[in-house]
Image (spheres, rainbow, N blue to C red):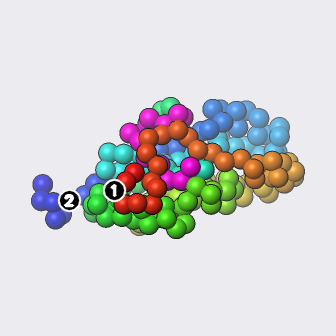
Amino acid sequence: MDPNNATYPVKLYVYDISKGMARQLSPLMLGIQLDGIWHTAIVVHGEEFFYGGGGITNCQPGETSLGEPNSIIDLGTTEVTVDIFMEYLTSLGESTYRGNQYHLFEWNCNTFSNEVAQFLTGSKIPAHITDLPAEVLSTPFGQAIRPLLDSISIAPQGGNTFNGQYGQR
């Protein structure tokens, strides 16, 4: 394959961190049906990349502490090389996606996956994932438990965390 015209597949790995509990309990607790509480990651160049309370992290696809993804969504392909992508991630890790900036409802793994998907493919991740926090907070119970949920930081164990130094992950 001509490296000047190479394309690389881009996938969205979707995990239900509630392990099915959201589907069962959301009608009773929230008054609305949720199919899951979604954690997402981008898989490109043979690695899985995600954001949590520890910052931007990568590992082998499907090797986080969350186990196998509930679904894998094909986001298309990219012409972005691994070197350019790593520079991009390093820049994000130094600026907008440091671990201390994580917020469960407003700046989370899905925000990261959406931004990275747009960078790589020009497309967003599905709205039912990115709209989930607003759905939860639109309910009386969601508003009541927001102070508790605001204190939660999700950081699935993976492999390497980007520490802001290109090539040192």
Say how many tags the image has.
2
The one nearer the camera, 86 or 20, is: 86
The disc labelled 1 sits on which kind of residue? Gly
Mark 1 secondary-structure assignment? loop
Q: Is residue 80 left or right of residue 16?
A: left
Q: Is residue 136 left or right of residue 165?
A: right
Q: Is residue 39 left or right of residue 89?
A: right
- Residue carrying label 1: 167
| Residue at point 28%, 54% (across, down) | 8
Residue 104 lies, in percent from the top left, at: 68, 53
Q: Which mark is residue 63?
A: none
Residue 105 in view: yes
First reached walking from the N terminus: tag 1 or tag 2: 2
Q: Would residue 93 be counted in the magenta stretch? A: no
Q: Which residues are magenta?
A: 54-66
Say whether marks 1 and 2 touch (CB < 8 Å). Answer: no
Q: Which mark is residue 6?
A: 2
Q: Residues within 10 Å of mark 1 (few under 14, many from 20)?
A: few
Residue 34 lies, in percent from the top left, at: 69, 43
The disc labelled 2 sits on which kind of residue? Ala
| Residue at point 33%, 56% (across, down) | 167
Q: Residues within 10 Å of mark 2 (few under 14, many from 20)?
A: few
Q: Would residue 65 be counted in the magenta stretch? A: yes
Task: Kindly indicate the quadrant of the structure image that contains residue 102.
Answer: bottom right
The one nearer the camera, 82 or 69, is: 82
